Amino acid sequence: DSGVTQTPKHLITATGQRVTLRCSPRSGDLSVYWYQQSLDQGLQFLIQYYNGEERAKGNILERFSAQQFPDLHSELNLSSLELGDSALYFCASSVGGARIYEQYFGPGTRLTVT
Amino acid sequence: GNSVTQMEGPVTLSEEAFLTINCTYTATGYPSLFWYVQYPGEGLQLLLKATKADDKGSNKGFEATYRKETTSFHLEKGSVQVSDSAVYFCALSLGDGQNFVFGPGTRLSVLP
């Protein structure tokens, strides 16, 4: 158990809908990262928050947004969903942003868009 | 830019065989290096890490040595078990966000 929790574990929804994925980092970790994992594109970095502020942005679509709350949990919002958004979404956390810090991953949310 | 290259998979081995998964990297600075493992249906778990040249990371019988001269961090295990079947990811970190880069993953299947 990494100490990172994600809910829900599975999500099935229709095209055009909006969903929210939730992540709680390990106790004491200030950074939260979101990744998308699909069969054909591997692990894609989406966005990072550090202590409530956006720190880095990767390949995140405009239809997606995220935030980190004062208690450090984070939410990833996906809207106007398309079939191609079906994937595993992982949250990871780390102590900070220095190069020596490893990331700890949650179990993921499997999103299926029908 | 920063990138990680791993050997193409899948890799299929018999139980008790020797395992090597090659990993090389390109980085604009001095990265830390990691191996992560993903078992079926689960998230990535940190397997081992090394933060400076010549460091050897080890865990659960797996080892990898940070070779700055060859920009490599190959994963080895002397005797694999069926329970080692998983996808293995090599990664480098220069810090935040896009500076934490994962390789494409190598799928390992170990047959009894």
Image (spheres, rainbow, N blue to C red):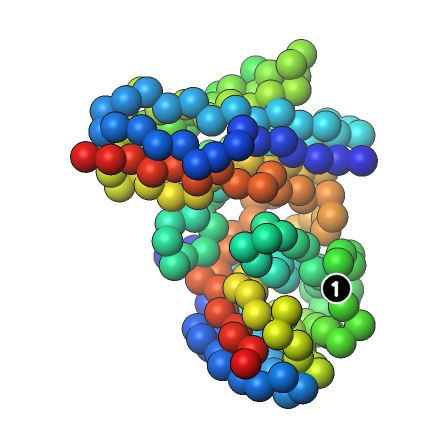
Task: Find disc 1 in the rendering and name its residue.
Answer: A60
Q: Which residue occupies the foreground of this view, A72 or A77? A: A77
Instruction: Write the residue at 38% across / 28% down.
Output: B62
Mark 1 chain: A
Residue type marked 1 = Ile
The answer to whether B30 appears left or right of A38 in the picture is right
Residue A34 locus on image (x, y percent): 63, 62
Position of A91 relative to B1 (above/below): below
Do we see residue B96 in this rendering? yes
Q: In which quadrant of the rendered view does residue A30 lie? A: bottom right
Instruction: Write the residue at 75% across / 30% down.
Output: B27
Do we see residue A71 in this rendering? no
Residue A11 locus on image (x, y percent): 49, 79
The answer to whether A114 appears left or right of B29 in the picture is left
Q: Residues within 10 Å of mark 1 (few under 14, many from 20)?
A: some
The answer to whether B15 appears left or right of A107 in the picture is left
Q: Which residue occupies the foreground of this view, B105 or A93? A: B105
Residue B36 locus on image (x, y percent): 48, 41
Position of B37 relative to A39 (above/below): above
Q: Which residue occupies the foreground of this view, A80 or B34? A: A80
Instruction: Write the residue at 37% across / 53% down.
Output: B40
Instruction: Write the residue at 72% across / 69% down.
Output: A52
State the residue lying farthest toward the left.
Answer: B112
Q: Find numbered disc 1 in the image and state the secondary structure of the residue it sits on.
A: loop
Identify the image quadrant of the C terminus of chain A: bottom right
The answer to whether A15 appears left or right of B28 in the picture is left
Residue A107 locus on image (x, y percent): 44, 62
